[in-house]
Image: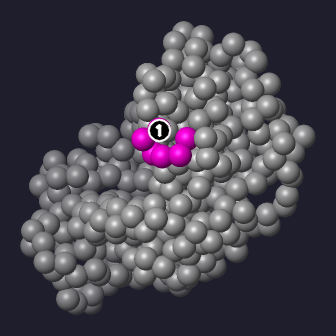
Amino acid sequence: MNVFHRDTLDNGLRVLRADMPQVQSVTCMIMLAAGSRYETRDTNGIAHFAEHMFFKGTERRPTAREIGMEVDSLGGEFNAFTSKEYTGYYVRCAADYRDRALDVLVDMLRNSKFDPEEIEREKGVIVEEMNMYYDTPRDFIGGVYDQLLYGDQPLGWDVIGRKETIRGATQDTFLDYIRRWYKPERMVVGIGGRLSGDELETVERLLGDLEREPTGAPDPTAANGNGSQVKIHHKDSDQAHLILGVRSYPIVHPDRWAVQLLSTVLGTGMSSRLFSEVRERRGLAYYVYAHNQSYTDAGSLFSQAGVDINRSEEAVETIVREFRRIADEPVPSEELEKARALAKGRFVLRLENPQGMIVFGLGREVLNDPVLEPDEVIAGLDAVTAEDIQRVAQDVIASNGLNLALIGPFEDKAAFEALLK
């Protein structure tokens, strides 16, 4: 049974609906296949900055306060997010206010003023958000790892951008970016929750007159080294943060479910191998986990941890050992079934509310992922065998160099490089 109903307007804009009659709310979301990887070196950070500016006022709702007051009058909440490959804007509210919520969203995206005075004022906000990001090693280590893995190309740049590009942004910078990428072919409207059946007509009225216009595509991700690499960001701190990982698969790949279960066995939950070995048995870290991050044309399987500075080498050595063990030895059947149940359970919990459901669906749809229905994900996970996991582990771990990013008071890479050999 399909959860999602998909329609396409004449201008190419897609509409995804998920009826959840058991709830009293709706989540209305507009997601675009336009994130930080669609930027140039000179505009790095503009996708995230634009996300802020869409809330600053339109012709009909001239200020951020007026937009906020209208959403508050619906008893709703609204927000946005920017990633490397997509951006999303949403309003959550009672189902009876769906049309007004969509009207606010569309007005923001179609009629924002990008007032120069507001842009200048918001630059200070963005710079302070950057300072918070750089001062939070648990967050910033992801940027250090991406720089190591992808180098000087969009996937290697921080979503938040650089201070010099933020300070140099003008109204034209925003308008050029929006005119290039915010087009119907890259836009998906999602509505999840208690539906009434006339949602498509509302979307057609609000967005059907947008002109179809091809946008092209961003440059493909280029290779950036093929051996083991270490990158250190020096910071005087009381704890070291690290990411150790390997290149893996893009989003659409025949072994996508096997690599997901591989990461689950390694580092999802308090019974995972990394949690048990790094934290419980050795006391090397407060947090440690594994994750597979896939993009449309690249991917990485990695572990992240915050570790005792004086035992950082032991922590790296331990994580490396667990990576190599899962490539050398098949996962026992009991452990595989536990990981399978965990992966399926976490996925199902994500879909319990309208926002989780529509974020899942739009995230697939906007990147042209053919696996859209939840049942397809469950079936994919159910089909994975221990042999699949070991084969994939040998492909992505044993056949690739290990990459290590570190934040801490370290000067010399040599000791860490030796641990990756």
Residue drawn at x 44%, y 32% is 69
Three-letter code, disc 1? Glu
Q: Is residue 50 above or below residue 244?
A: above
Q: Residue at x 70, y 42 (%)?
A: 188
List the residue tagged with mark 1: 66
Residue 381 image point, x, y percent: 57, 37
Single out the residue that lies furthest toward the top: 22
Residue 415 showing in the rendered view: yes
Q: Position of 110 compared to 166: left or right?
A: right
Q: Is residue 4 left or right of residue 118?
A: right
- Identify which residue is drawn at 30% across, 65% down: 128
Q: Position of residue 263 (x, y in %)?
A: 44, 51
Q: Quadrant of the N terminus?
A: top right
Q: Which residues are magenta?
A: 61-66
The quadrant the C terminus occupies is: bottom left
Magenta region includes residue 149: no
Position of 374 compared to 123: left or right?
right
